[in-house]
Image (cartoon, grey):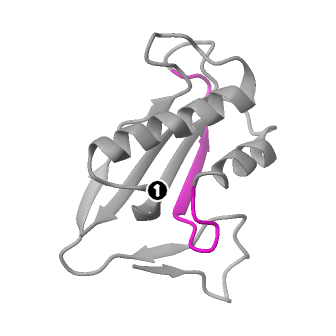
Amino acid sequence: MDFVTPDDLPAPAGYSHAVITGPGARLVVTSGQVGITADGAVADGWEAQTRQTFVNLGIALTASGATWADVVKLTYFVVATDELPLIRSVRDEFVDVTRPPASSLVQVAGLFRPDVLIEIEATAAIR
């Protein structure tokens, strides 16, 4: 895979502008994951919810035969953008920061529950 960050685009904050997958790659697309544990407990606050969301994404990726190294795109849905530095810091604990996935972030009015602050989808390419 090639992670592309052209010099004639603004410098990205921990993501690649594009990712090129090779021939024969299979895509793994996760559903949006949130900061809720398997027993239904909602993590408390931005940091805990973001970390649990990434843990849940990792579980979904592993169950599909993918790893964090295979992730080519992350899509974030957040109820506020005040905590972006924190979200990026937690993200960097999971992704390869030398080859970060492409990324989109959307601020939404709300998620499926009022106590859920963040939802993230991942797309991975495996061979």
Asked whether 104 falls inside the magenta stretch, the response is yes
Identified by mark 1, the residue type is Trp
Q: Position of residue 125 (x, y in %)?
A: 32, 64
Pick the quarter of the image with the N terminus: bottom left
Determine the image quadrant of residue 106: top right
Residue furthest to the left in view is: 24
Is 122 situated left or right of 78 in this image?
Answer: left
The vertical placement of 49 against 38, above or below, is below
Q: With 16 as the anchor, is 68 left or right in this view?
A: left
Q: Nearer the viewer, residue 8 or 68?
A: 68
Is residue 30 visible to us here? no
Q: Which residues are magenta?
A: 95-111
Quadrant location of residue 121?
top left
Residue 57: % across, % down: 45, 40
* Above or below for 82 versus 69: above
- Residue at horizontal 43 percent and vertical 17 percent from the top: 38
